[in-house]
Structure formats: structure tokens, C-alpha cells
């Protein structure tokens, strides 16, 4: 039998899934804009602002649920975790916005054609990380926690490989700066996705585990 609090919890989870989908679209578009040197900043900024608004709405809803109902321990864990995940997702939007601003702040640059620099590969891997985080939030499938953790480790490896390759590149200063910043933003996105895995594990087990 469902409880009144379950309705509120489901509303919060639905809001969170909406946020994660927007964040995934934001990062995908930001990466395409970076690689093609296209100005996607207006759309990314709009999505980033939407994520901020939704994050605040989710926190208000969680506070309302706690005030109106009598949450059990598991409910409180879920509410606390959802608020934290909303912050992580809002950061996805912020990093996507940072990537989209590179063209505006640095101007055009010559792309690195060195095959050792695999920024596009790293981008695809991070999008896979975010897709896994979205599915994990939706299903609470504990097997996805370890998949996400493994993917996050792969992103870390790609980050270090790319950092070394970029440092050895003979590209111009603006190109070096742009590529270094974008891989750093991608690495941070992946870290925040790992935090989501930790939060879902906390909901499921009541234990704090770290996957980074």
C-alpha cells in the first residue's frame, strides 16, 4: 500500500530525472559546439538556468515533504540524497556552460589533429557516464553503480593521457588552453556522476561508499 509520502518522493524523483536529461543534452550540445567551433552558448545558458531553477524547486519540494509527512529513516536518506544529486546535476549544466563559453572567451583556434589527443573519445565516454547515472537514478539498479564507477575510472585515464598529449602538442597557446580546459571540465563532470552513484548507494544500503 502506497503512503502519502511516496507521492512526494516520486514527484521529486521525476523532477530529478528531468534535470538529468537536460544536463545530458546540454553536455552533448556543448561538446559538439566545441569540436565544431560553433556558438551554442545561448541554448546551453538557457538549459543551465533551467537546471538551477529546477534544483531549487526540488529542494523546496523535499523540504515540504519532510514538513508535511513523517519520513522514516529510508525516506530521509532518499530526500537527502535527492537534494545532493540535484546539486551534482546542476553542476553538469554549469560545466556544459563553461565549455560553451570557450569560443566566446578565447576566440577561434586551430583544432589539434594529433591522433594522440582524444578529446572526442573522452567526451563520448563522459556522455556514457551521464547516461548511466540517469539510468541508475531511474532504476536504482545496484549493478549500474559499479558500471558507472568503472566508466569514471576510464575517464580519469583518458584525462591523464590527453593532458600529457596536449602538453606535448605544438599547437598555439589558445588551442592548448581550450583543450586543457575542456578535458578538465569533462573530468569534473565524471566526478560528479560518481557522486550520484554514491548517493544512490546511500539510499539503497544506508552506507557511505566512495567510487572515485
Image: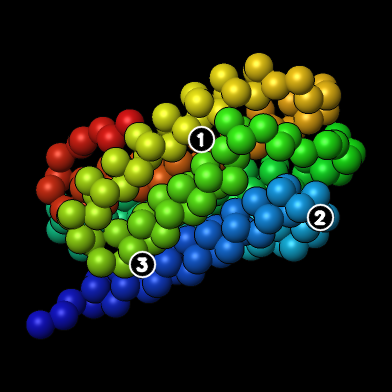
User: Which one is closest to the eye, mark 3 or mark 2?
Assistant: 2
Side of 76 where 115 appears, left or right: right
In the image, residue 174 sits, relative to residue 68, either above or below, namely above
Q: CA distance from mark 1 to mark 3?
A: 26 Å
Residue at x 70%, y 42% (from the top left corner)? 98
| Closest to the observer, 136 or 89 | 136
Secondary element under disc 1, as helix, strand or loop, is: helix
Instruction: Give the quarter of the figure containing the C terminus.
Output: top left
Horizontal and vertical percent position of residue 87: 48, 47
Name the residue that disc number 3 marks: 13
Mark 2 or mark 1: whose residue is earlier in sequence: 2
User: Which one is closest to the eye, mark 2 or mark 1?
Assistant: 2
Q: CA distance from mark 3 to mark 2?
A: 34 Å
Residue at x 14%, y 45% (from the top left corner)? 206
Horizontal and vertical percent position of residue 161: 50, 26
The reply to whether discs 1 and 3 touch (Cβ–Cβ < 8 Å) is no
Side of 175 where 211 appears, left or right: left
Query: Is residue 111 visible in this depiction of the protein?
Result: yes
Horizontal and vertical percent position of residue 145: 24, 49
Side of 2 where 147 appears, left or right: right
Name the residue that disc number 1 marks: 187
| Closest to the observer, 205 or 32 | 32
Q: CA distance from mark 2 to mark 1?
A: 22 Å
Query: Is residue 52 visible in this depiction of the protein?
Result: no
Amino acid at each position: 500500500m502506497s503512503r502519502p509520502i511516496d507521492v512526494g518522493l516520486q514527484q521529486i524523483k521525476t523532477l530529478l530525472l528531468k534535470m538529468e536529461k537536460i544536463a545530458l543534452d546540454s553536455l552533448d550540445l556543448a561538446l559538439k559546439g566545441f569540436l565544431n567551433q560553433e556558438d551554442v552558448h545561448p541554448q546551453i545558458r538557457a538549459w543551465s538556468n533551467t537546471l538551477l531553477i529546477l534544483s531549487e524547486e526540488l529542494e523546496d519540494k523535499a523540504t515540504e515533504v519532510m514538513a508535511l509527512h513523517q519520513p522514516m529513516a529510508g525516506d530521509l536518506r532518499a530526500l537527502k540524497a535527492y537534494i545532493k544529486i540535484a546539486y551534482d546535476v546542476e553542476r553538469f549544466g554549469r560545466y556544459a556552460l563553461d565549455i560553451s563559453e570557450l569560443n566566446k572567451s578565447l576566440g577561434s583556434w586551430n583544432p589539434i589533429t594529433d591522433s594522440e589527443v582524444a578529446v572526442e573519445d573522452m567526451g563520448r565516454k563522459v556522455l556514457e557516464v551521464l547516461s548511466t547515472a540517469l539510468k541508475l537514478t531511474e532504476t536504482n539498479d545496484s549493478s549500474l553503480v559499479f558500471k558507472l564507477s568503472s566508466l569514471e575510472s576510464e575517464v580519469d585515464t583518458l584525462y591523464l593521457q590527453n593532458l600529457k598529449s596536449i602538453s606535448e602538442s605544438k599547437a598555439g597557446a589558445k588551442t592548448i588552453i581550450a583543450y586543457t580546459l575542456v578535458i578538465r571540465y569533462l573530468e569534473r563532470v565524471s566526478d560528479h556522476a560518481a557522486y550520484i552513484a554514491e548517493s544512490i548507494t546511500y539510499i539503497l544500503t544506508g552506507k557511505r561508499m566512495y567510487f572515485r
